[in-house]
Amino acid sequence: MVETTTLDRTKPASAGNALLSVRDLQAWYGESHILHGMDFEVRTGEVVTLLGRNGAGKTTTLKSVMGIIGKRTGAITFDGHDISRASSDKIARRGIAFCPEERGIFASLDVRENLMLPPQVRPGGLSLEQIFELFPNLRERLKSQGTKLSGGEQQMLAIARILRTGARFLMLDEPTEGLAPVIIQQIGRTIARLKTEGFTILLVEQNFRFAATVADRYYVVEHGKIIDGFANSELEANMDKLHTYLGV
Amino acid sequence: MSINIQALLAQLLVGLINGSFYALLSLGLAVIFGMLNIINFAHGALYMMGAFCAYFLLNLFGIGYWWALILAPLTVGLFGMLMERTLLQWLSGLDHLYGLLLTFGVALIIQGVFQNYFGSSGLPYAIPDELKGGVNLGFMFLPIYRGWVVAFSLVICLLTWYLIERTRLGANLRAATENPTLVRAFGINVPRMITLTYGLGVGLAALAGVLSAPINQVRPLMGADLIIVVFAVVVIGGMGSIMGSIITGFALGVIEGLTKYFYPEASNTVVFVLMVLVLLVKPSGLTGRAT
Amino acid sequence: MSTITQNSVPTPTTRRPMRDEMIAFALMTIVLAVVPFTGVYPFFVMQGLCFALLACAFNLLIGYGGLLSFGHAMFLGTAGYVSAHALKVWELPPELAIVAGTAAAFGLSVITGLIAIRRQGIYFAMITLALSQLLYFIYLQAPFTHGEDGIQGIPQGKMFGVIDLQNTTTLYFVVLAGFLLGFLIIYRAINSPFGEVLKAIRENEPRAISLGYKTDHYKLMAFILSGTLAGFAGALKVFVAQNASLTDVHWSMSGEIVLMTLVGGLGTVFGPVVGAFVIIAMQQYLAGFGQWVTVIQGVIFVACVLTFRRGIVGEIGHYFKRSL
């Protein structure tokens, strides 16, 4: 599969199976203008990663798609529907699930309640048994208070609970941040498994070595705009550029 | 000091009854505060509306107490939800204090309107026939209605606790109290939940009003002084836990009752004095987290 | 989330605010000074002045300290009762009675301040309300207040032995002097380093703490100043009304103080003055309508919170881009 970059905005994007299409997305946090015109798309079955420095606007992009940012303009289309003005609950019900950077495990709920909280938005969500197959340690911790889990366990829980919903488009914000290598590997395996099952994933990751194990394409975000994009096959060739972008 | 057991137990019972109202009202306030971040100053007026609703149901429609126990909370609860949709929802981005001011204004409106039509004197509401009379327990004489009030309030409080702490709906409510944005991003209609939660809190207040009607008379200002005591109860208990609000409410009622027996002049003020003491020792309240 | 005063205080202006405020102050003083020579009923204006000072004192706490007190009636009432008692029973001369009342309010504000400052925001409001209610019940039962009857028939006497307070015009100017004194004290406090720290605390308390300020001390001082001046207003009011009663300590009085300041403009310098006169005038005008006054006050509360948060003076200031 040869991917074309979408750096040139005047070229129409390759037609057909763009599940999420974002055009000229601008977003503000209060007075701060964070996104200055994001243009990208995610096709069905792909894993796309947004790379960039801290503060580039990657998380803001995910939040804008999810509709939980203060003010946004631009065109966001999901599965053929315009979601640029929709409220976040309606967006979720279109079949998008969001796993935030801070994980968002509820302290006033136990693990089971955290897991069962997100409602089914599409048929075919994972059953509890399938979830425990992916994340065995959750089974023993069901009665624990949500925040008593370790960082890695909380990340598992955060991913597990959105898998129950039946949403086929997942947005994961820094799922490996602050986690031990063995847990990171487990998450990598989980994402790879989800990919084979046909999930579409938009990933934000600082750790591009991890991203390289699962991503199909990358976009580089800087100052609220996409400044570059390439396929996974082009990653090695772009390594120097990437180091410059990320200041690594 | 010789203690007149009968009199003491009688005061204790009164204390338990007051405690029931404190528990029901502070529970409603805590639930509303958790979800909406508003201290509902109108709570006392809505309690009063519950009592008046029972009065109207009986005197205008011939509908008796047992139906009133269901219909009054529903009606006043609906009124509360209407209030939330039309007035309170505009406050969501603002400083919490505006909520206090707005609901204070609503309380003045409701109480003023009722005062205009019904003056300040009390209207009677009869104890339902099934609950009339009393039982001689040997160590005291227990009026059935008063025993019923305490028992029923306790049941309602525990049911509310169960609803919030042990059910799926309650889990949604607790999660939305903690992080409404994320809960909404999962596809749950949080604004509707907020409205329903306000309705629930108001319904509890109205239910307390119906229970109160046969004991205290039905007066426009019956909730006004009560709500201030409930505020003190809430400050003492903190709003950190549902069970905490319930226990604090009943306990303070009992303490008030005991004070009435041993030192009657202080009975009006003992809850406030306790509030001062708690603030000096544990400012976040007995169950609250430190602010 | 906007703080309660960010909606009313206009953004910085190009005009030097001091000059505008001095002009407004001069205007206000002139208007008030000529009142006895117009046909306006002086008792109404005197009552207005007392409540204006009371509202200004309340506003110091909420507008500049960010603390909403729902119990300011306790200062009004306490000072009133003590002054009244001093005049009638101890037979003190007026100036000492005022000092006594104000001192009582000062003492009360220290005690209640130490208790209430422990919590913030909504809890602070509820605590001040509860404390005020506690005092209400104490006064209800205390013999010296005569309960529901209140202390009646208070002699006005001669201030400093020479100023005859029974003369309405003389009394008026004494009350006016008291009001202006209190107003200037508040103004001075707002525009002093103390006031600047207070504003910083209101805007961003964690930051003020990180800068090394003992914010609790500042808030307590603001509370004490506010309570003492409210008491001063209460002491003055005793001479105007010639009685001290339970209504002055009731929570509805605290609510009216909040309403006056809200209507006039929270956090503005002249707002409370305007608001006080508006509400007093409204009460006079609607006196025959019984409890509808309560309903109307409630409606004004709701309307102000929803659509008129800046208050009268705040809106005027916003329109002309001045800070008043």
Image: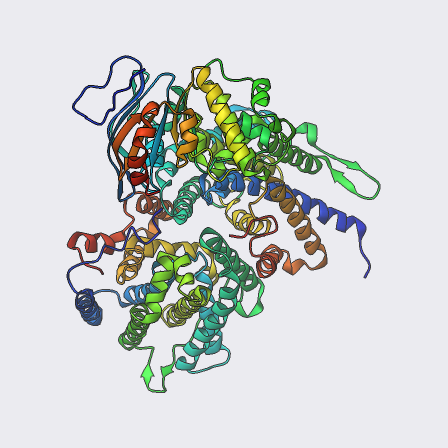
- Count of picture labels: 0
Q: Residue at x 22, y 27 (%)?
A: A7
C194 left or right, relative to B169: left
In the foreground, B171 or A22: A22
Q: Is residue A121 visible?
A: no
Colour convention of the picture: rainbow
Residue extending furthest toward the bottom: C161
Residue extending furthest toward the right: B138
In the foreground, A24 or C260: A24
Q: Is residue C212 above or below residue A179?
A: below
Q: Is residue C8 visible?
A: yes
Q: Is residue C90 above or below residue C67?
A: below
Q: Is residue C225 above or below residue B276?
A: below
B273 left or right, relative to C203: right
Q: Residue at x 52, y 68 (%)?
A: C111
Where is residue B86? Give x, y as percent: 36, 34
Where is residue B56? Give x, y as percent: 50, 30
Q: Which quadrant would residue A95 be assigned to in this image?
A: top left
In the foreground, C102 or C318: C318
Q: Which quadrant would residue A130 be assigned to in this image?
A: top right
Where is residue C240? Give x, y as percent: 36, 70
Quadrant holding the N terminus of chain A: top left
Q: Is residue A240 above or below residue B188?
A: below
Quadrant holding the C terminus of chain A: top left
Where is residue A234? Give x, y as percent: 31, 25
In the foreground, C210 or C129: C210
